[in-house]
Amino acid sequence: MQRPIEYENLIKTRALESVAPTPGAVERYLLNAKNYLDSAKQIDQKLSLQVFTAAYEGYFQLVNAFLECYQVRTKESGRNLVIQKVAADLKMSTIEQASIIRAHERRNSTSYRSPFPPVSAAEAASLVAILGKYLAVATEMLRDDDSSDVCKKCGHIPCSCGSVRPRG
């Protein structure tokens, strides 16, 4: 997939750096995001921080999938810029983008500064919903044109059930 001009401009400003691709990494990041989503849904909803953290890490796996697809890594920008850039790439609504930005701030606040105020069940549920919605969007956007990579038996990329898939 060709790198969008916005990413080229971020390389020029040293916010991002160009890197060589890692074969299979995009698919693995997407699978990791799905696994985080599944985990967030299985955690007792009374454990808001843990649900929130799983959903946040799942979203950041989507961010990493985009970065890998466009063969870039953060350099001088940190997470915040790429979190916002991928939210825009996913064409999130302004409300969803604001929610993602707040989630990043909340994650940093509860992880590095203070556990207060605690993450609410509503914040956690909102982030789980956003991850669920945009995991499907990201998978479609980043999917190779070669759909034979999707296992017909288990649906994973790469296959996790061990069945052999014919190529092309």
Image (cartoon, rainbow, N blue to C red):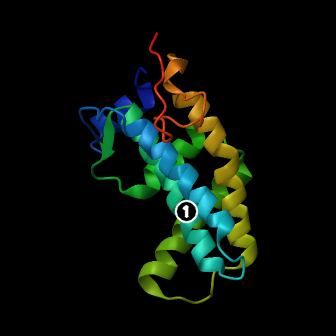
Q: Quadrant of residue 73?
A: top left
In this rendering, is residue 59 above or below 91?
below
Q: Residue at x 30, y 40 (%)?
A: 13
Picture coordinates of residue 159, whole percent (x, y): 48, 35
Q: Is residue 106 left or right of residue 9?
A: right
Q: Residue at x 60, y 27 (%)?
A: 152
- Type of the residue with mark 1: Tyr
Q: Quadrant of the N terminus?
A: top left
Front-most of 58 and 67? 58
Please say whether residue 91 is visible from this viewpoint.
no
Picture coordinates of residue 46, whole percent (x, y): 71, 82
Q: Residue at x 44, y 45 (%)?
A: 29
Picture coordinates of residue 78, whole percent (x, y): 36, 57
Question: Which residue carries the number 1 mark?
Answer: 56
Q: Quadrant of residue 3?
A: top left
- Give the farthest residue toward the right: 122
Q: Residue at x 61, y 70 (%)?
A: 52
Picture coordinates of residue 163, whole percent (x, y): 49, 31
- Give the farthest residue toward the front: 163
- Give the farthest residue toward the top: 168
In this rendering, is residue 149 above or below 59?
above
Tell me the element at label 1: helix
Front-most of 74 and 1? 1
Front-most of 33 and 13? 33
Please say whether residue 42 is visible from this viewpoint.
yes
